[in-house]
């Protein structure tokens, strides 16, 4: 993305765009006129299946924030995922905890661009899609990616997140 195009993005999205560029990710952050705060809204705005939306969910486990990138087509089974991941109980982070851990607000949390990397799981179901979309740091920004690229980008672990 050209420098002037990056600079026209919201501040949080500029951080995400820089992190993607530094990691050699070809997908570019784009701003949508419609909200992409929920998987359904993002899918409608992008014209794709809801399952191709990679929701970024922040949980607290063992006293620390963790990130779960899940397909928009289902909910995370926190007990099953915690056992599979070898972690303690997963509790949904509060909005303040999300902002503290990521620098971003719920509904726009990107997989990167955080103050520090978070332990991450990437939902195995995202591998069903050739192209997926992740939030770009705000509820109106997204970028295209793949499940394998998310794993590489986040240093994450590919696991099923449902029972």
Image (cartoon, rainbow, N blue to C red):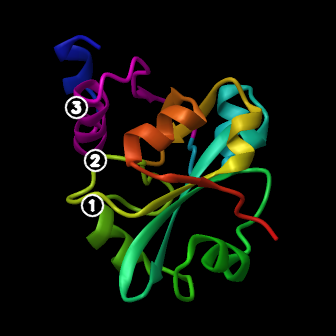
Q: Quadrant of residue 97?
A: bottom left
- Residue at the disc numbered 2: 113
**Which residue bears the numbered disc 1?**
103
Tags 2 and 3 touching, CB below 8 Å: yes
The correct choice, above or below, for 85 with respect to 7 in the image is: below
At which x and y percent is residue 147?
59, 37
**Residue, disc 3:** 18
- Helix or strand or loop: what does disc 1 sit on? loop
- Which is closer to the viewer, label 1 or label 3? 3
- In the displayed structure image, the side of residue 79 where residue 142 appears, left or right: left
Quick check: marks 2 and 1 in contact, CB under 8 Å?
Answer: yes
Residue 34 position, x and y percent, is 57, 36
Decide if residue 33 is in sight here.
Answer: no
The kind of secondary structure element at disc 3 is helix
Q: Residues within 10 Å of mark 3 (few under 14, many from 20)?
A: some
Where residue 87 appears, as percent x and y from the top left, is 52, 80
Range drawn in magenta: 10-34
């Amino acid at each position: 993305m050209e420098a002037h195009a990056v600079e026209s993005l919201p501040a949080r999205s500029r951080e995400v765009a820089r992190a993607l560029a530094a990691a050699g990710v070809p997908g570019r952050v784009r701003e949508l006129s419609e909200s992409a705060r929920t998987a359904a809204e993002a899918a409608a705005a992008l014209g794709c299946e809801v399952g191709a939306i990679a929701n970024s969910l922040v949980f607290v486990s063992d006293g620390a924030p963790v990130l779960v990138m899940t397909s928009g087509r289902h909910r995370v089974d926190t007990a099953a995922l915690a056992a599979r991941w070898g972690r303690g109980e997963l509790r949904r982070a509060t909005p303040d905890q999300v902002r503290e851990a990521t620098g971003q607000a719920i509904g726009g949390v990107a997989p990167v661009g955080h103050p520090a990397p978070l332990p991450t799981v990437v939902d195995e179901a995202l591998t069903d899609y050739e192209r997926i979309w992740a939030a770009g740091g705000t509820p109106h920004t997204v970028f295209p990616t793949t499940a394998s690229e998310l794993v590489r980008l986040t240093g994450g672990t590919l696991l099923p997140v449902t029972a």
